[in-house]
Image: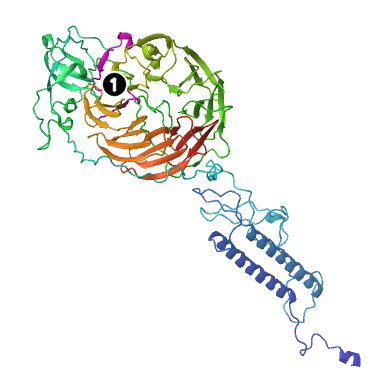
């Protein structure tokens, strides 16, 4: 054997180690890698379904919860899976290349003698379909059981090697919007910050001192008392009575003779009419409370022991003890006054009773509600302010009626009247009545950015009062001295008129209660509103002369069914039974009275730089404060508060029970006409500007 032969060892020699099968090793490693990749992907799928993976990328719109949950695309999981697929493909390619270098698949193998023949093997690479290279991975639905998606891979027949299937985690498009829209949260804008002019504490009115001319007496608590009937006697003349409680109903066939004893067995809610028995043939009827005298009745059951039955509070003959009697169902009910819309201030003293009683008043945190925008006119505003829906109304010395937006202060419209008035505009059933010139009223209807004309009323004498209303009738006072009169006009035909001509002095703003209008001038009359039947005087007060402030009608009453409060030239304030004119008490105010107002318990008297609260039960003063000057507006009252505005611009809010000052503020300049209150708003005319201040009701 040659040296070269000795150096070359035969493969068949026993000392030579057997060769390794490298293809099997590579295949085993590849399978193990694929196995662990599958385990890893399975874990990722489980984690994604159970929220154990990284937080999913937020979607633009929250996916609504549905009966079948729709998976939210997880971009991070998609990217990770894509990276792992790339690594698998790279590893498999590398292994294939290495194998081809060690043992080509088509090279014949040298077999040891006597060894079993080896079967030729080929490395089967994983096939990764690139049919949709942009398609991300997809996490299958967990519940209900997943439906196998269409595989992007080639079919089994087309495959030339064993494929390792990797779960396809595909990125779906944004979820289809459902019928339920995503709620849009509209941010609540903060209220505009106060701008100049600021509301400052009034300098001219420090905390008003209390003046207590009277010591209030305890008010008796009236218990519920009711009687079946009361004895009464008719008045001194024969009286027309009716089949229903109104002169609009038909009179009975017979008159009620003078001085006839009758039994009254019921009343209307306000007590202005009584239900009586009996005329001839036991005929029942309705008669005005003022036309009979209830007398001679025993003390009703239910009166507390020891009460003074001679007092007006415990009078056994009070018609208040009678039950409310229902209207005969065959009769058509009389129209009732239209309720004042919430937020409106339609008449000179808010309502047709002149009560000054409002549903709400602004609280102490008054701020400039119109910002830097103020309602301005060419010249000073002259008339008191009225409010109707979005309209804040006032006439100016520049001859125009302005409508300003209630919420913003911007001008809605204006009407050129070529004249103006210091009387308040009035609103009724959608129509605006604007006094202008000495003897004219312009009637219009709000049309948004304009006002549509309705009529132009000319009267035979100068206007004395602002218009007021009873159903379809417009009442207005005109003239002075011997020319003074109250005019009633049909709303639908203002030329159809009737007049009440008894007054001999300029009329004050009348008050209306049910179907009675209270005419205040040199005397005080209660007149039936049915002027077309001939104005019937229900009563004429013997106790009141030369009225100096508009009367106030209050229903329900605290002593009688309804009450009337009036101030006269004697500087006294009188409380009257509104249905009969009977005086209940008199309070010596001792100073000129400008305005009255009422709530459930008190009468508020303003005048001579004073504001006083008087008990409606007793007529005694509870508290008195100094206002620091004459009033431009108020008192405006609720059950627990009183608001006044002085001519110098001070705004003061008092506790109605104690008279304590709850808040004070100042309008930047003098207030030259009566302001209006509209829920949480106060609108005050000052010069050629209306200031809108706002608080919380």
**Picture quadrant where residue 415 is located:** top right
Q: In which quadrant of the rendered image does the N terminus lie?
A: bottom right
Query: Mark 1 Cα within 10 Å, few/some/many (few <14, many 20+)?
Result: some
**Residue 614 in the image: above or below residue 326:** below
Tell me the residue at 45%/32% (across/down).
675
Q: Which residues are magenta?
A: 531-557
Q: Nearer the viewer, residue 213 or 185?
A: 213
**Residue 192 in the image: above or below residue 338:** below
Q: Nearer the viewer, residue 250 or 125?
A: 250
What secondary structure predominates along the stretch shown in magenta? loop
Direction from residue 644 to residue 71 in the image, left or right:
right
Direction from residue 276 to residue 440 in the image, left or right:
right
- Where does the image place residue 580, in percent across and percent down from the top left? 22, 21
Q: How is the image coloured?
A: rainbow
Is 28 covered by the magenta stretch? no
**Does the rendering let one see residue 333?**
no
Is 556 covered by the magenta stretch? yes
**Does the rendering let one see residue 275?**
yes
- Where does the image place residue 640, in percent across and percent down from the top left? 33, 40
Residue matched to label 1:
545
Looking at the image, which residue sits at the far top?
253
Q: Nearer the viewer, residue 150 or 76?
A: 76
Q: Nearer the viewer, residue 590 or 620?
A: 590
The mark total stands at 1
**Picture quadrant where residue 642 is located:** top left
Tell me the residue at 66%/63% (across/down).
80
- Where does the image place residue 357, in percent across and percent down from the top left? 35, 32
**Secondary structure at numbered mark 1:** loop
Q: In which quadrant of the rendered image does the C terminus lie?
A: top left
């Amino acid at each position: 054997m040659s040296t070269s032969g000795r150096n070359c060892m035969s493969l068949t020699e026993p000392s030579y180690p057997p060769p390794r099968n490298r293809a099997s090793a590579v295949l085993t490693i590849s399978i193990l890698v694929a196995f662990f990749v599958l385990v890893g992907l399975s874990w990722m799928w489980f984690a994604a379904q159970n929220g154990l993976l990284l937080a999913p990328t937020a979607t633009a719109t929250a996916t609504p919860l549905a009966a079948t949950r729709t998976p939210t695309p997880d971009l991070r999981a998609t990217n990770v899976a894509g990276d792992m697929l790339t690594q698998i493909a790279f590893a498999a390619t590398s292994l294939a290349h290495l194998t081809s270098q060690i043992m080509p698949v088509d090279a014949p193998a040298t077999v040891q003698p006597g060894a079993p023949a080896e079967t030729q093997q080929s490395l089967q690479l994983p096939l990764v379909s690139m049919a949709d290279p942009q398609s991300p991975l997809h996490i299958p639905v967990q519940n209900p059981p997943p439906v196998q998606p269409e595989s992007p891979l080639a079919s089994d027949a087309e495959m030339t090697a064993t494929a390792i299937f990797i779960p396809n985690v595909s990125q779906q498009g944004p979820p289809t919007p459902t019928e339920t829209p995503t709620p849009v949260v509209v941010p609540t804008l903060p209220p505009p910050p106060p701008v100049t002019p600021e509301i400052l504490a009034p300098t001219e009115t420090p905390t008003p001192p209390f003046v207590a001319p009277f010591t209030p007496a305890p008010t008796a608590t009236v218990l519920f008392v009711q009687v079946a009937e009361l004895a009464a006697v008719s008045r001194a003349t024969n009286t027309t009575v009716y089949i229903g409680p109104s002169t609009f109903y038909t009179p009975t066939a017979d008159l009620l003779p003078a001085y006839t004893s009758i039994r009254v067995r019921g009343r209307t809610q306000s007590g202005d009419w009584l239900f009586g028995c009996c005329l001839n043939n036991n005929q029942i009827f309705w008669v005005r409370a003022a036309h009979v005298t209830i007398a001679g009745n025993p003390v009703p059951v239910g009166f507390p022991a020891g009460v003074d039955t001679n007092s007006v509070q415990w009078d056994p003959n009070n018609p208040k003890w009678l039950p409310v009697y229902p209207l005969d169902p065959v009769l058509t009910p009389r129209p009732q006054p239209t309720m004042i819309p919430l937020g409106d201030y339609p008449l000179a003293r808010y309502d047709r009773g002149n009560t000054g009683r409002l549903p709400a008043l602004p609280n102490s945190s008054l701020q400039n509600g119109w910002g830097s925008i103020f309602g301005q006119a060419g010249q000073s505003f002259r008339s008191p302010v009225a409010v109707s829906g979005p309209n804040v109304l006032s006439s100016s010395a520049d001859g125009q009626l302005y409508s300003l937006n209630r919420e913003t202060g911007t001008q809605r419209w204006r009407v050129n009247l070529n004249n103006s008035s210091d009387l308040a505009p009035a609103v009724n059933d959608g129509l605006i009545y604007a006094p202008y010139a000495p003897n004219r009223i312009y009637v219009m209807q709000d049309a948004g950015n304009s006002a549509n004309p309705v009529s132009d009323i000319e009267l035979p004498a100068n206007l004395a009062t602002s218009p007021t209303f009873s159903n379809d009738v417009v009442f207005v006072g005109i003239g002075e001295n011997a020319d003074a009169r109250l005019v009633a006009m049909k709303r639908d035909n203002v030329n159809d008129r009737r007049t009440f001509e008894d007054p001999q002095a300029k009329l004050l703003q009348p008050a209306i209660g049910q179907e009675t209008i209270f005419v205040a001038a040199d005397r005080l009359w209660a007149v039936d509103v049915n002027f077309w039947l001939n104005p019937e005087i229900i009563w004429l007060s013997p106790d009141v002369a030369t009225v100096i402030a508009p009367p106030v009608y209050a229903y329900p009453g605290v002593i009688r069914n309804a009450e009337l409060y009036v101030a006269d030239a004697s500087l006294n304030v009188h409380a009257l039974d509104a249905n009969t004119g009977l005086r209940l008490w008199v309070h010596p105010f001792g100073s000129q009275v400008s305005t009255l107002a009422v709530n459930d318990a008190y009468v508020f008297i303003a005048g001579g730089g004073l504001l006083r609260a008087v008990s409606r039960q007793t007529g005694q003063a509870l508290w008195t404060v100094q206002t620091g000057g004459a009033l431009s507006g108020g008192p405006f009252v609720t059950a627990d508060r009183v608001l006044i505005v002085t001519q110098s611009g001070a705004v003061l809010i008092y506790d109605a029970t104690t008279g304590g000052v709850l808040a004070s503020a100042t309008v930047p300049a003098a207030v030259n006409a009566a302001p209006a209150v509209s829920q949480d708003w106060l609108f005050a005319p000052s010069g050629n500007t209306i200031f809108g201040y706002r608080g919380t009701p």
